[in-house]
Image (cartoon, rainbow, N blue to C red):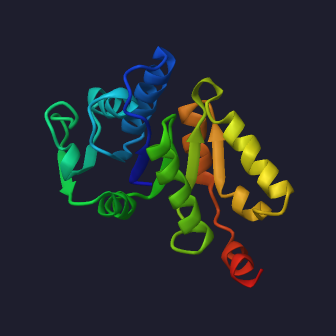
Amino acid sequence: MRSLCVYCGSSDSVHPDYLAGAREMGKVLAQRQIGLVYGGGRTGLMGAVANGVLEAGGVVKGVIVESMNTSSLAHDGLQTLEVTQTMQQRKWRMFELSDAFVALPGGFGTFDELFETITWAQIGVHQKPIGLLNIRNYFSHLWQMVKYAEQEGFIFQEHTQMLSISDKPVELLNLLLQHQPDELAVKRWMRQ
């Protein structure tokens, strides 16, 4: 794994543990010599994960939409900052640059990016690993919802297994590195 895309929130008005967890994730990426790909922001968890990578000597590539490329939102200390015209172009570019994906706590934008990435895996667009960094149990209810959807027949078990979850960055990265795509998952989705 050479690069990992992180989806996360940009709000500064969050519990300090979220910011610390994002910074730790960045530090671990740099220590493992895995480049960060993310939305290019300087605030909230976005800024914290980027700063964690940079402080530990790692490489960060930001991809930001033109309307958000302002001095108050865009991180000015990155090695690379690409600017796209639309959010759809931004998400696709982040996908192209990344070997795996991790969602940290965030809001609707994070959920959108996460579920689109999962859906792309489900229909066979990619077989890249996807994880949730469960800081302060942020994703525990979401995980329960996914398991309930599986129980009720809306999600196949092999698609649930595409997701890894941990509250520890090192453990989560290890899970992503061990990820083995299920070749039958896409066939089952297309068949049933």
**Relative image position of residue 101 (x, y in whole percent):** 48, 51
Q: Residue furthest bottom?
A: 191
Q: Looking at the rendering, which quadrant does residue 24 occupy? A: top left
Is residue 25 left or right of 55 when viewed as pictured?
right
Estimate the x, y position of residue 136 in percent, counting from the top left: 61, 23
Residue drawn at (67%, 41%) of the image? 142
Which residue is found at the position 66% from the left and 58% from the top? 162
Q: Is residue 182 left or right of residue 23?
A: right
Residue 94 falls in which quadrant of the image? Answer: bottom left
**Residue 100 position within the rendered picture, expressed as x and y whole percent measured from the top left:** 48, 55
In the image, what residue occupies the spot 58% across and 64% down?
Answer: 119
Residues 53 and 140: in front is 140
Give residue 145's position: percent from left, percent from top: 74, 45
Quarter location, residue 98: bottom left
Eyeballing the image, is 80 above or below 183? above
Quarter the N terminus occupies: bottom left
Q: Residue at x 49, y 52 (%)?
A: 112
Asked whether, in this view, residue 11 is left or right of residue 172, the answer is: left
From the viewer's perspective, is residue 72 above or below residue 98? above
Residue 140, above or below 97: above
Image quadrant in which the C terminus is located: bottom right
Camera-side residue: 78 or 117? 117
